Structures are given as C-alpha cells and as structure tokens.
Amino acid sequence: MSYKQVIVLRVDLGMSKGKLVAQGAHASLEAALKAKKHDEIMHDNSFNQWVREGMKKVVLKVESEAALLRLRDLCVRAGIKNALIKDAGLTEVPAGSITALGIGPDKEEKINKITKDLNAL
C-alpha cells in the first residue's frame, strides 16, 4: 500500500512563487500534523508508513476558491485529514484569503479519487 500527500494551491490569486511555496508548506505541515494526531488517537500507522515511504507529495492547482472548497468537502466526506489555509494578509493577499489545501497523507488510491482531474502546478 502506498501513501502520499497532496498540496493544492490557488493560482487565481496571482501569488508570487515564493508566496505559493510558503502557502504550500503551511498546508503540508498542518495536514500532516492532523494526520499524525489522528493516527495516535486511533492507533493507526498511516502517518508513520508515509514517513517510511519517503513522504511523497504532489502539488496541484485550482483556479478558484470554490474549487478548493469543493475538494475540501470531498476530503471530509471520504474521511481524509486535510488542512485549509487562510492567509494572515501581511504580504500579497487580503487577510482571510483561502490560499491552499493540504490533503493527507493517506492511501494514494483514496486521495487519487478526489484529485485525479487536477493539473500539476
């Protein structure tokens, strides 16, 4: 069984490359921490397995906030830990802007069902 994490970034906000990377890092870390906490409570080993496999990550893009929120809803329904990132508004985008979504880590096939139609950043 293979595990991965997906980071989805909004490209419609016109964020610089550096800002995109920072928002993706926030999404990755927050989602991973949620998954790790869930595994500790549920006595699951998914997070540790993902780490042992090399922490595979894929970065994808969406064109709108609505698309990102749809993905989050699909993750919630599928039971996949996720993290929606809202920016503090100190640099490039207004405060409260939803910029990114971290999905997983979880089973690759489970995440693929949700993200299969998205394009790479």
Image (spheres, rainbow, N blue to C red):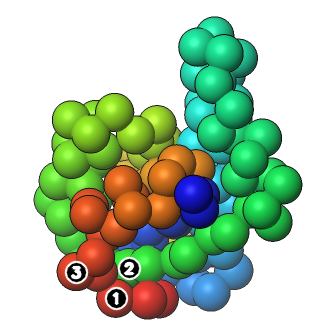
Q: Return the residue at label 2.
A: 61
Residue at far top of view: 41
> Which residue: 17% across, 53% down?
70
Residue 87, percent across and down?
A: 51, 50
- Between 110 and 87, the residue placed more toward the observer is 110
Q: Return the residue at label 3.
A: 117
77 with respect to 87 (left or right): left
Residue 12, percent across and down?
A: 30, 80
87 with respect to 44 (left or right): left
Q: Return the residue at label 1.
A: 119
Residue 32 visible: yes
Q: Contact (CB < 8 A) between labels 1 and 2?
A: yes
Q: What residue type is labelled 1?
A: Asn
Q: Disc 3 on helix, strand or loop?
A: loop
Above or below: residue 78 compared with residue 115: above
How dense is the environment of label 3, judged by Cα within 10 Å: few (below 14), some, or many (20 and up)?
A: few
Mark 2 → mark 3, Cα distance in angstroms: 10 Å
Residue at far front of view: 1
How dense is the environment of label 2, judged by Cα within 10 Å: few (below 14), some, or many (20 and up)?
A: many
